[in-house]
Amino acid sequence: MGAEERGAAARGTRDAAVVGGGLSGLAAALALARCGRSVVLVDREPAEPRGGPARDGRTTAIAAAGRAMLSALGVWDGLAAGASPILDIRVSDGASRRFVHYGRREAGGGPMGHIVENAALRRALRDAVAADPAVEFRAGAALARFEAGPGAVEIGTADGGEVRARLLVGADGRDSAARRLSGIPATRLSYGQTSMVCVVAHGRPHRGVAHERFLPGGPLAFLPMAGDRSSVVWTERRAAAAALMALDDDAFADALAARFDDCLGALRVEGRRSAYPLSLVNVERQTAPRLALVGDAAHGIHPIAGQGFNLGLRDVAWLAEETAEAARLGLDIGDAEVLRRFQTRRRFDAAAIVFATDGLNRLFSNDFAPARAARRAGLGLVNGLPALKRAFTRHAMGLSGELPSLLRGRLP
């Protein structure tokens, strides 16, 4: 799209309006723009201060396919220096000696993924969106209404603004206004768990190994970061988590060490700790007339396998694929047939990840003796079957099944 066409789009009907300025919304706006679409990004939050978001201890696991997508979007080079590769994954159950080890052999010799600080990822996406002339960013503008018509969707924001676009992309999180206003039904389920997140320094190097230990209250993950540091994602039942968060940093580190082994040496909390109640949100369908939902607006999942952002990237990649194909054929990208194809692409893949993460949490977050015996036997069985381990590894890397162009590292 040339400068004159972009100017015309700014004065009239855009190709797409993206609601939500979080990670999935930024990725959606950037992907559509890189594919030649004119985009307006509407976010209810006010503009961020110069320099971007503050570091808050949260990190994101980016699978190998997600890294390929960020590279195709021109974002990865700015993240690579601070990203820590996941070279091995060790999964264990409580005090059992049985475990599953996923290594470089199963991953084909390269990293299975990378751990990136949320603040750095958000800053890189924001900078890329801000630099793209095909995207207009409207901060502090909450979605108030929208009406889908035969040629476009008319969107109104709480500050009195109006937008007209061919397609509305709802990327506004678990409490999505786009989903609510569309009437799309969603299942909501509280897990009764809280995820505690922080960064710890440790006395021994992690060597690129990610650890996930299943405990009765929920999983405990150590994710490798740059330097002798790890991002900790510790899930516990709500009351236990509240008591742990009330401890000072030294006592919290002691409690953490008591539930982990000493393979990383002495632990010290760096920066602040955060806590987030966990729930499941899953839509009945991802589309409505001229609307597509992506990321947590469509399926907010348990962090047990670190797949949340990667699931959102898969949504965005397939939406970019289908709209790019429609545009090549001269079709309206918000047409019902385009959205039907997107829904078909996402239905089974998204459902598989939602049910897998929910099922894993239910299987492992208890101390019921028969379940404990079954899962420990299962860990030992999987660890002894290389072909099964390779299949699980490719799935975790986002490389299984049919992949859209962006997840293969190129624009559609």
Image: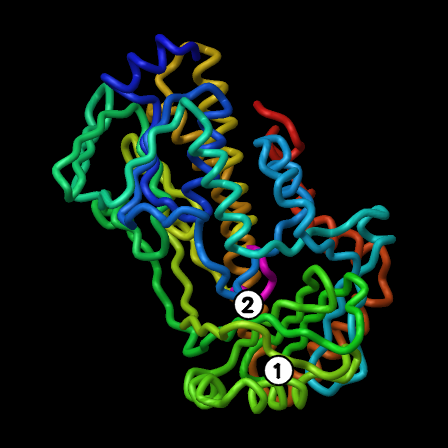
Say which quarter of the image contains residue 381.
bottom right
Q: Position of residue 286 (x, y in %)?
A: 38, 42
Q: Nearer the viewer, residue 20 or 348?
A: 20
Q: Is mark 2 on a helix, strand or loop?
A: helix
Closest to the observer, 341 or 320: 320
Picture residue at 46% right of the left edge, 19% below the top: 36
The residue under the point 32% across, 41% down is: 19
Q: Does the magenta stretch include residue 149?
A: no
Asked if labels 2 and 1 touch by Cβ distance under 8 angstroms, the answer is no
In the rendered view, does 203 fall on the left or right side of 83?
A: right
Identity of the residue drawn at 42% across and 21% down: 37
Kindly identify which residue carries mark 2.
359
- Other residues around mark 1 within 10 Å, as few (<14) / some (14–19) / many (≥20): many
- Whether 105 is drawn above or below 285: the answer is below
Q: Where is residue 77 in the image (x, y as percent from the top left)?
A: 65, 38
Give the percent coordinates (x, y) of residue 87: 79, 57
Q: Which picture quadrant has residue 393?
A: bottom right
- Numbered range of the magenta stretch: 303-307
Q: Kindly identify the amino acid type of the residue bearing the numbered disc 1.
A: Leu
Camera-side residue of 42 and 182 = 42
193 sits to left or right of 228: left
Sooner in the amino-acid sequence: mark 1 or mark 2: 1
Q: How far apart are marks 1 and 2 (CA)?
A: 15 Å
Q: Mark 1 points at which residue?
A: 215
Q: Which amino acid does label 2 sit on?
A: Gly
